[in-house]
Image (cartoon, rainbow, N blue to C red):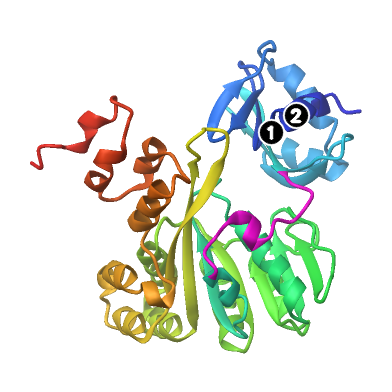
Amino acid sequence: MARIDAFLKLGLAQGCSDVHLAVGVPPMLRMNGDLMPIKFRQLSDTELETYILEVLTAKQKERLAAGHDLDFSYVGDEGGRFRVNVFRKETGIGAVFRHIPGDVPTLDDLNVPPILKKFCDYHQGMVLVTGSTGTGKSTTLAAMIDHLNETRNLNIISLEDPIEFVHPSKNCQVIQRELGTHVKSFADGVRSAMREDPDVILVGELRDAETISMAMTAAETGHLVLGTLHTTGAVKTIDRIIDALPGELREQTKGFLSMSLKAVVTQVLVKTPDGRGRRAVLEILVNTRAISKLITTDQTHQIPSQLQTGKNAGMQIMDQALLDAIRAKEIDADDAIRYASDKKKFQRFVTDTDMVPTLDVSGG
């Protein structure tokens, strides 16, 4: 058994989401959003490097020695599956192991709005799940793929970096391909996927102009494209896509978004009232005729008002979704306020007195 498995086993027993290993500090566990050290000595550079090298392939060792970061999946001797990032920094080597549950969660398990199931019914176009790192985007997309796998008969091609949840084929054929192992880049993966008779293409991250362009082409040519972006709202997502492509393609990109972007889901993870878990809270944009016009006329700043008034279409703005979850006693107000835009609306729910002075209670 690799020595690093002892830390991973402890992390699994504690129910953590991530195990952090870095030089000069003891191993740390991410517990419900907070980073907590375990009772162990500080790790030296040499010690930690030997731990990590034990779980690397020869090719991975070569890449690390050449100065590259590593992203890969790892299955420990205890059976836990992890998404791993290995990197070097000023004090030496470091790694983060994120636990991937063995069972793919369902959309019902995640307690997300029912409209996400409707997004899976689209036959073409683009649906994006966005948010900061560690907000559960991959989990939501995995649940959407599982819903498709249960309810439709499709060819699903998933491009991931690395592969996280493993999807056995049920009613669908699910082909999972990993960057660095099966394809060179997301853009190459999409290009190849379009020649493999896909119905659905999942793009793990729309991280550059070429990938965005290829994903747009796939969505325009009769495929359902699911993807992620590291953006923190519907408006920022649309603006990010427009700005990512060359200026001469601006009008063409706006045209694509107005016609083929079906929905944007932005999520945050907020602690539950008992502090023992976290729940996803979602902002949801559904591309209506009104929103389509705002995109083509460079008035994306008016989209939030459409989200506020679009409840019947399944839309919701983040602040209102947070308030609704607080009133339903599903999330902790003191944690929720960190993700709110208009923090004054949350003032009467906050119990942490240290946060009250930051709320500008005078209205000035």
Q: Quadrant of residue 201 in the image?
A: bottom right
Residue lying furthest front: 328
Position above or below: 230 against 43: below
Q: Name the residue type under label 2.
A: Ala
Q: Name the residue type under label 1.
A: Gly
Position above or below: 254 against 107: below
Q: Callout 2: helix, strand or loop? A: helix
| Residue 213 appears in view | no
Identified at 35% across, 74% down, the residue is 310
User: To which residue does mark 1 refer?
Assistant: 15
Asked whether 102 falls inside the magenta stretch, the response is yes
The magenta-colored residue range is 100-114
Q: CA distance from mark 2 to mark 1?
A: 6 Å
Residue lying furthest top: 41
Asked whether 75 falls inside the magenta stretch, the response is no
Task: Tell me the number on the disc at residue 226.
Answer: none
Q: Residues within 10 Å of mark 2 (few under 14, many from 20)?
A: few
Task: Tell me the number on the disc at residue 13.
Answer: 2
Report if the CB atoms under discs 2 and 1 are less than 8 Å apart: yes
Q: Quadrant of residue 169 in the image?
A: bottom right
